[in-house]
Amino acid sequence: MEIQDQYSLKKHNTFGIEAKAKKFIAVHSIDELTQVLHQNKLEKKFVLGGGSNMLLTKDIDALVIHIDLKGKKIIDEDEDFVWVESQAGENWHEFVLWTISQNFGGLENMSLIPGNVGTTPVQNIGAYGTEIKDTFISCKAVDIENQQLKEFSKAECQFGYRESVFKNEQKDKYIIASVVFKLTKKNHKINISYGDIAGELNKNNIVEPTLNDISNAVITIRQSKLPDPKELGNSGSFFKNPIVLKSEFNAIHKRFPEMKYYDISETEVKVPAGWLIEQAGFKGKRFGDAGIHKNQALVLVNYGNATGQEILNISKDIQNTIFEKFGIRIEAEVNVI
């Protein structure tokens, strides 16, 4: 292990933003992680995973610790289920593909989401009708202050829509080292009710889809809408879909009857943020090297040399315009640094 000074983070964030870390070190085991934390107690620290859910607007004046813990294993199983533990540094999509190759069900709808396994519980990532909390059992995390390893149950993680305890009460207090998922071995719960999955399957004349069929359909849909970060800097969906009280939404809907929405409870609806952004006229717009993707209004992109601040300014403009036009506030899903 070696600490490097003034280290470029351009290759460590999917937006491809040029920013420097005051100090940088990659750790490959829990022992290395605890050692670095213990030896640098007085240093300000910044934890870096896959860099897929952040927007760097400045250099990081801290010790950046890159979590590069690798490995996955079956820790328990019975006739119907398998418990799989993945280390935090495993690439999420590659992990999902591995579970499918083993015929383990539960993660297939979340294929091709960028990032690493360790950050998935923080955000309670989700796609096409599924979320991490649906298969999550527990995670192990290192206390930054005292270097002790603590296990968090599903209840302790306090999952919500793109929310968890790690974004709230325990923010910046723990580093997730590994995650345990409970997946099906048979009688898989195939979910094709959300988005365009059913249409994609019909297009390919698939009547009884396998886990692999679902994954392939999701990959095809995502690739048609979302740019590859390796080719065009982005962080996937930049905004959360806003949740609005029905009592407030009814008045908005009268003014905009064409507005799409989904009932999520007796008192709340979810409005697609992408639809709002498109209706506000931002889809496909470009401002210098920063812009909004032509195929998916939720995705802000770096065409080459945009700064994080330029992308942030666009996001604020979008938020303000949508509030003025629709009376709905949309929040950023990515972490702005």
Image (cartoon, rainbow, N blue to C red):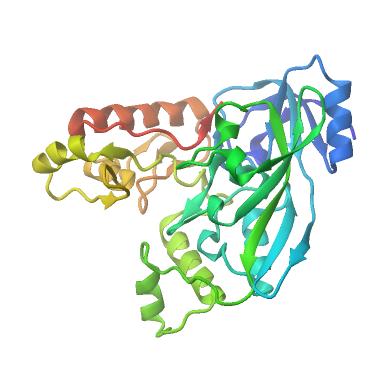
Left or right: residue 266 compared with residue 40: left
Task: Classify the position of the N terminus by image quarter.
Answer: top right
Q: Nearer the viewer, residue 317 or 69?
A: 69
Residue at the left extreme?
A: 254
Residue 217 rendering spot, x and y as whole percentages? 46, 70
| Residue beneath the point at 57% across and 29% down | 56
Image quadrant of residue 299?
Answer: top left
Q: Nearer the viewer, residue 283 or 113?
A: 113
Q: Is residue 95 visible?
A: yes
Task: Classify the position of the C terminus by image quarter.
Answer: top right
Residue at the top extreme?
A: 42
Q: Nearer the viewer, residue 175 or 23?
A: 175
Residue 323 rendering spot, x and y as whole percentages? 25, 29
Image quadrant of residue 181?
Answer: bottom right
Q: Is residue 284 visible?
A: no
Above-or-below relation of 231 to 200? above
Residue 72 rendering spot, x and y as whole percentages? 77, 58
Above-or-below relation of 261 to 128? above
| Residue beneath the point at 24% across and 41% down | 281
Left or right: residue 125 compared with residue 141: left
Left or right: residue 312 compared with residue 317: right
Residue 22 rendering spot, x and y as whole percentages? 74, 21
Q: Nearer the viewer, residue 243 or 279?
A: 243
Above-or-below relation of 2 to 191? above
Q: How many marks?
A: 0
